[in-house]
Structures are given as structure tokens and as C-alpha cells.
Image (cartoon, coloured by chain):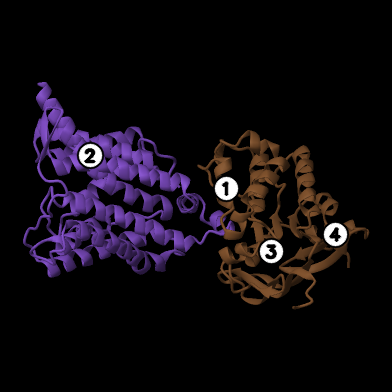
Chain colours: A brown, B purple
Amino acid sequence: MSNNTNALEIVDLRAGYDASDVLLGISLHVGLRERVGLFGPNGHGKTTLLNTISHVIGPRAGSIRFMGEAIDALASQKIVARGLIHVPQANRLFPDMEIMETLELAAFTPRAQKELKTNLECVLSLFPRLAERRRQQCKTLSGGERQMLSIGVGLMCAPRMLMLDEPTLGLSPKLKDELAEAIAEISSRGIPLLLVEQDIAFVLSLVDRMYLVDHGEISREINRGAEVDHQDIMDMYFGSERA
Amino acid sequence: MTSDILSAIIVSGIVLGSGYALMASGLSLVWSTLGIFNFAHGVLMTLGAYLAWTVSDAAGLDFGLATGIAVSIAAMVGVGILIERVVVRPFYDHRDILLITVMTTLAAMIVIQKGIQLIWGARLKQLAPIMPGNVRLLQTTISAQEALIIVLAPLVLCALWLFLGRSRIGRAIRAVGQNPSAARLIGIDVSLIFIIAFAVSAVLAGLTGVLLGSVRLLTPEFGAEPLVKALIIVIFGGLGSLSGTILAAYIIGLLEATLVFLVGIYWAPSLIFVLLIFVLILRPQGLLGKVVR
């Protein structure tokens, strides 16, 4: 048995699309009960990083270990079967399927099927609005409802770790608060979390630790409680003009 | 128009429609799952009928019709998987998969059709009917086999409907058709689903061939005309909608029977095309279609 203390461990990961490299050697880790944020401007590799971890795209170099085992060569469905669940950005899910059908289907892997009943209860109590609209088709949902369903689908997969990509993208402040509560509730059950967000206040309210991603690399690591230097963040977005 | 003629038209229209519905539903399934048209679908129907003939007929292996049909249907699973592997799978990541697979599935169609001609020759063959004799229906006499097709088609389509709507694999097929990347992220093996969709579709084609193989004569071109009809039906019914496909199959069947009566067998097929063009001008998305993805 390894004395591994991390849920996710990434070393020098490189990946990209076609001729362009997007991730230029990323190393990070997420502890077994830890909530970690990824923060940084658009187009700097956060979504690519999640896509590489869940093997939507293949890594070009580096290693990814989940619960102590290498997963960088595994196909997406095998990674899901191990319980590393990626809830993608602005997921439009399955437009013609009903909410309940989608949630039941999401418990697809054998492990998830065994937990179907308990996870379904958990999702419906976490998002009562989904319970009210159970017969409604995904394409008729509002942005907030679709985001709830996306997270619900992630929970139906029986996660041992969740990766959420901008769960509050385009939502009103009120809905953001609702989702933040739900996410906090999920992670309070001991599910480690990797959260990508643009809203710095939102990330900081939810995570123990945060990485700043800049041009395909980790530029800084910020612990909770540490003062966030707003100048640093402004620099990241607008470029440093100080000599 | 006397009631005799009317009922004859309706009955023969329903017979046609049932065959079309079985045929087109397989084509529709592959379209809505993979977003491609399988032009080899018609020749799969031919192959299914010839395989059943070889195993069952006295001039072949003479194992009886039940064995012939069973062997044929089982073989279609393999043929469907093979087609997917050889002419579709290499192009999944290609931007122009739709156009490329038009060519590759057409190529597969030609190869299989010529292969059938080589193996079985051009001489006409016919399967024994599952049910011999005649049946009277709505003051019209049809063969019992045709009556069987009328009854069996809705049952098979209902089974397909339940499979896609209720079963875990069926739902996964629909999910992959609607959003493959989201399907992958809930643990569905997308390429396995593609194989299953192709296998189910090939079985439907083989089943159509086995059922029609005793009503019509078998030639290597046996499936060519049904393929064209099935293409029309899938488009007319609305791409991606199985219920639209089934509805369209029966409408086209009845329309064809009516036109055959009114203008004769020579002009009926062309007129169906003309009418289809008018329908698509008025309703480009087809009967129950959604906006094409």
C-alpha cells in the first residue's frame, strides 16, 4: 500500500490541440479531502487541463495519478469508472432527454449503478428544482437549471473526486449563491474538489487552496487566508506595466 | 372508387409501409447516433435474405427456414460490426466524416453486391414464406406472409422503441447521438455504442430482407430500391426522429400504393420524388424533424 495522501497528482503535464501546445508543463495536487481552485484568464489552459485529466484529449507528456494510480493512458470511460468525474463547462447535456432519464442514465458505470438510489435522493434534495421538473427535457431548462443538472449528473456518476469547470458561468448572483451552497454541501461530504472559476470571490469562498494558471503554467499557489494581492491578479489579466 | 379498390390500396400500402418502416428505422438509428448515412444498408438487407436462403433452401444447406433466419440474423450482427470497423471507424475524428462515409459506405455496398453476384450468381431465388397460404383482410386477399409483415413490423418497432427509451444501452445510444462528449464524461464507451448501433441497424436490415425475400424475388439488387426509399423516408420523416421515420414510412407506403393505382407502376416512383420535393420546400426539417445539427 502506498502512503499516498493525494486524490490527484499531476506532474509536468503537457497537452494541446493539433500543432499548438496549451499546457506547458503543469504540476499540481489535490489532497484527499481538499478543495482546490484553478483561477486565471480565459484561454490560458484551465479547461484544457480538465479535458486532459478526463482524457477528452490525450496528454503529450507528464503524468496524472488518481488515488495513487496512473490514469494518463486510460480512456475517459475508465477514468469515470474509477470515480474521477469531470463536469464540463456550459454542458448542454442531452437536449431531448428528460431530467430524470438523464440522471438515471448518468449512473452508468457499475459502481454508479449500485449507488443510483442514494445518489438520486441526494441530488433531488440538493436541487429541489430538478425534482419539480423531472419530466422536462434538458433543452427547455434555464441556464441555472442546466448547471444544477450538470452537477447532479456528476454526482450520479458516484464521484470519488469532482472537477467542476465554471459552474456559475453566466448565472445571476442569486443563483451563484445557491450553487455555491450546493457545492459546499457536496464537498462537506468529503469529496475532493477541483474547481475552475473566473469569479475570484466565488472560488475563495469555496476552496482551501488555489492555483493561478497563466499561459499554460501554474504561476502561483495561494493558500486560503493568505492575503490575495489584487495587483497580481490585475497583472495577470492586463499584463504587468511595472518595470 | 369502389370500396374494394380502396381497401386493396390501403392494405397494399400498409404492407409496403411496414417493410419501409423496418428498413428505414435502421438507417435512422445510425443517422441519429453517428450522424452518417449508411449506403450499405440496402445491401445488408440483400445479404440477410441470401444467407437465410442458403441455410434454409433445399438447393442450399437445407436446414429449414427457422435455422436459416436465425443464422442470417446472427450473421448480420457480425456484418454490421465489420462495416462499422472497416469503412466508418477510421474516419471518426475527421471533419468531413459525413462526406467520406458517403463514399466508403457506397464502396462497401458495391463490393458486397458484386460479392453476392459472384457467390450466388444472377439467377433469381426466393425464400420460403414463414407463413404459407393467403389471408383475407378488409375484403382483399393477401399472402399470409404479407399479413405477417403487417403484424410483425409494429412489434419490432415497438421493441426498438422500448429498447431506446427504457434500456440502459438504448438510452446510452440516444445520449451518444445527442452529445457524444457529455456521454463520454458519464462513463459511456462511445465507440462501443457506435458498434452496437451498427449491429442493431444491420439486424433490422437483415430482418427486412428475410421477411420480403419470400414476397419478392431475390437478386443482387434486391436491396437497392428499398435503400432509396428508406433514404427518402428518413429525410421526409425528419432527420434524427425515429417516430418521424416510422410515420413517414407508412405515409410513403400508402402514397405509393395510391399512385400505383392512379398512374401505374411506371410513374409512381418518380411522382413520389416530386411530391417529396414539394413537401421539403414547405417543411425543410421534414415531418417531425428538428433543426439539422
In which chain is the residue bearing label 4?
Answer: A
Dots 3, 4 in contact, CB < 8 A: no
| Residue depth check, mark 2 versus mark 3: number of the one nearer the observer | 2
Which label sits on residue A208?
4
Residue ID for mark 3 = A45
SS assignment at label 2: helix
Which label sits on residue B150?
2
Which label sits on residue A104?
1
In which chain is the residue bearing label 3?
Answer: A
> Disc 3 residue type?
Gly
Dots 3, 1 in contact, CB < 8 A: no
Up-down relation of residue B81 to residue B151 (above or below):
below
> Disc 4 residue type?
Asp
| Residue depth check, mark 1 versus mark 4: number of the one nearer the observer | 1
Measuring from the top left, give residue B57's x and y in whole percent.
11, 61
Evaluate whether residue B273 shows in this view: no
Residue at the (74%, 71%) spot, across then down:
A9
Residue at the (27%, 43%) spot, across then down:
B153
In which chain is the residue bearing label 2?
Answer: B
